[in-house]
Amino acid sequence: MSDSSKLEKTLFEFLLIHFRFTYYRKQQSKLVNWISQQFFANYEKKQKGFFLTKAKSKKLLIVNCSAPTKCFFGKKNYKVNYWLKMPKIMTIVQFISLLLLIIFIFFSSYLWYSERLIQLCFALIICGVLSVIAIGLPQFKCFSHIATLTTAIMIAQNSQMDLLLLKGEMSDLPHKLIANKYSKIVWLRDIYNGEQIYLAGRKVDNTKEEMIFAADKTPEKEILVKNVNRYGNEVVPKSFIISLTKLEQLASEITINHISKI
């Protein structure tokens, strides 16, 4: 095994042991500070360390640094267009759960003062379930996510790219990222959660935008993305991709009817 292969394997194992369940803000800050100190010491830190940049860099790499949100519903696989909407759907579900939680807390107080203990027990159980959904939990089975983060760190370091570490899953990326500074923006989704890597790209003004993700193709030529939020992924990659050029060569380029705006 080459030294470079040992490095990404060691990095993957370290992240898996120490940052596997990174989800809340304090955990995220600890992770990005460690990444910047170990791999990007000569980069400028912005956005509290979540954005690592160099003055002359013309390429930007984007990846989610926190564990995927645990989901308690959904199918095993999603069509690409629906999968792209999932972060927004889960955000709406969490917001509705938070509203219902507030209502049930007041209702539980009423039951307490009314001494309706049986109804109070049921209300408290419902409050517990709603609080878990509203606050959110990390997906514990997130090997492919950690592998993707490992790849992003290695590629950004090897290619001297700016690195933006997202604080969660998104359906689309902030428009402010498009400054005329970048000639290329690459958004790495989960690239180890499927048998084939796909690339959806477009050109906006002078900026080339790419979204790279993994999925499976059915015998009917339909592309399906595994629902890692509900079912997770505990398959350890046999090898890691540490070159953006190689990653793009391995990817099959596709056109998506609606590509989230970067």
Image (spheres, rainbow, N blue to C red):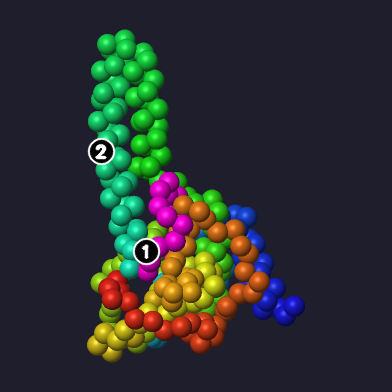
Q: Position of residue 23 (x, y in %)?
A: 46, 52
Residue 83, numbered circle: 1
Quarter of the figure with the N terminus: bottom right
Seen from the viewer's position, the closer of residues 226 and 115 is 226
Q: Position of residue 36 (x, y in %)?
A: 51, 67
> Which region is colored magenta?
63-80
Q: Residue furthest right?
A: 1
Residue 99, numbered circle: 2
Q: 249 above or below 99?
A: below
Q: Residue furthest front?
A: 220
Mark toward the start of the polypeptide (2 vs 1): 1
Q: Point out the frontmost of discs 2 and 1.
A: 1
For mark 2, give the secondary structure: helix
Q: Residue furthest top?
A: 115
Q: Position of residue 59 (x, y in %)?
A: 40, 83
Q: Within 10 Å of the Cα at label 2, are there few (<14), some (14-19), or many (20+) other Cα atoms?
A: few
Q: 56 above or below 28?
A: below
Q: Within 10 Å of the Cα at label 1, are there few (<14), some (14-19), or many (20+) other Cα atoms?
A: some
Q: 172 above or below 155?
A: above
Q: Is residue 166 magenta?
A: no
Can residue 247 be seen by looking at this rendering? yes
Residue at 46% x, 52% y is 230
Seen from the viewer's position, the closer of residues 135 and 115 is 115
Q: Amino acid at mark 2?
A: Leu
